[in-house]
Image: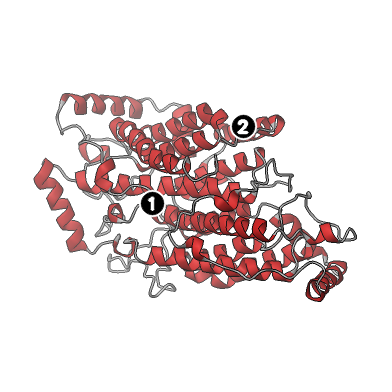
Amino acid sequence: MYNKIIKNKQIAVIIFAMAILTTACERDIPYYMNFDSYAFTSTDENGGTWSHILPTAGDITIDAPSATNSVEYLAEIAAMKSAMQQTTPEQKKAIEYWTNNPIIRWNEIAVELISKYNLIPGPNADGTYTLPNAGNPNGPPPFPFANPPYAIRALAYLSVAQYDGMISAWNFKYAYNRAAPYQHDNTIAFAYPVNTIPSYPSDGAVIASASRRILSAMFPLEVEYLQQKENEHLESLFLSGGNVQSDIDAGKLIGNEIATRALSRAATDGMSKAQTPKPVSDSIKAAAFERFGWQWTNQENPVRPVGLTPLYGKVRMWNVANVEEVRPGPPPAIGSVEYLEDVKILKDYAANVTSERRRIANFWQDGLSTFTPPGHWNRITKEYLVAYEFNPLRSARTFAYLNMAIMDAGISCWDAKYYYHYPRPIEMIDGFKTIIGTPNFPAYTSGHSTFSAAAAEVLSYVFPEESDQVWTWAEEAANSRVYGGIHWTFDANVGMEQGKTVAEYAVNRARLDGAD
């Protein structure tokens, strides 16, 4: 297990994260992280042998690079040196911004877009609703509605493409072993801490091209913006002294090929059918009532005709073969002793709203116009990646297993929500009031709980020294929904167990991928 720690940086990140959790509301949590480039604690020379996630990701090939004493390569070096002499202040800022771990920057761009598009489409003048449509992204309303299921799917595909691209890049780097330009010409001043990782193909270019392709598909109205970010990133690789143009071109080829494979999977994963028409939604509700004798009813006014993504539980999972494998048992029957005890607990919380419970409920709300609960856990993960000085390959691996686990947990959670169709407290307790907005989908199990437990399980595996801390945060996130009045305690408790169980599939896969 790779777990070397830089103690002073670890302490700094924990203090920073704790300060956020103590003082901020959810809108104050920054998705942009201010950090400097750093020396990697490992170069992972065998990274090209690690197992890919996408089945055909290992099929990509690139041509051998020119020899470092060839006319072609020497011309590339000369072109680089000439361009570096004319670097503008804006270009220098871009080089500093992208750093030598641009995995983090593209993750930030993703959560920025999630926050921008995390807006519920409003009702039409006649009270009806029009849903966002990928076939007409301009709308109205604009596509997508980046709710938590959509958000984690975007993050999962982004992270998997980045990770598979990094494995391919590392494979060719050490197969061809062409050192970076600044190691051939000592007059080239490299912008970042030096390392011995070969430069062909450019791992940064892999990240830039794969990320731009994935995010353009997920956020089609942002194609121009994302192309501008890719261009800026690619230029910074060249002007940093780290990659000649042939390094970058080879990296772009890998990035685009990997993105094509990832988007092919996305096109057939079932997400396009997750938001159902009303007749289908009504049939799901009727089936649950026939099975259990209860059903959830939307409390909105005006009422959206369909809850949030009723068939998200049918979306293809990454690491679990069948969602029924991880479906929890049923919630307490309405009117049972366990149910009535929970009613008492929630009434007590509602009658005794402490400042601490309100803080927790608000901090973990991660509601509209925020980066959602999955984005919150990605923000925490970035802090650890920098504290432990992970290289881009190992950073990509962390995000890939994190976001696959959270997505699988979300799919499992939504399967339970619409299979059991359990009502929320506000429907069942006379005069009950919440302190945060009530979501328009069933209660059991809690999405925050499953997302958070899945994240904690993966982060505990990658950063074992942080296990106590991340599980403390996960429990707080789960409790926040109970304190807010929108979930039963069993929604949260069973959701935690569910998220951990699902994430164990991801961790078990990670233990066998060759990186430990």
Could you classify mark 2 by the number of other residues whose Cα lies within 10 Å: few (under 14), some (14-19), or many (20 or more)? Answer: some
> What kind of element bears circle 2?
helix
Q: Position of residue 469 (x, y in %)?
A: 53, 29
Relative to 215, 318 lies left or right: left
**Which residue corresponds to the image point at 28% horizontal and 31% vertical from the top-left?**
490
Relative to 386, 467 lies left or right: left
Amino acid bearing label 2: Ile
Q: Is residue 296 visible?
A: no
Q: Nearer the viewer, residue 106 or 32?
A: 106
Q: Nearer the viewer, mark 1 or mark 2?
A: 1
N-terminal of the pair, mark 1 or mark 2, is 2
Residue that badge 2 annotates: 14
Determine whether 150 is above or below 19 in the image: below
Amino acid bearing label 1: Trp
**Which residue corresponds to the image point at 55% horizontal and 64% vertical from the top-left?**
210
Quadrant in which residue 316 is drawn: bottom left
> What kind of element bears circle 1?
loop
Determine whether 475 is above or below 106 in the image: above
Residue that badge 1 annotates: 318
Identify the image quadrant of the N terminus: top right
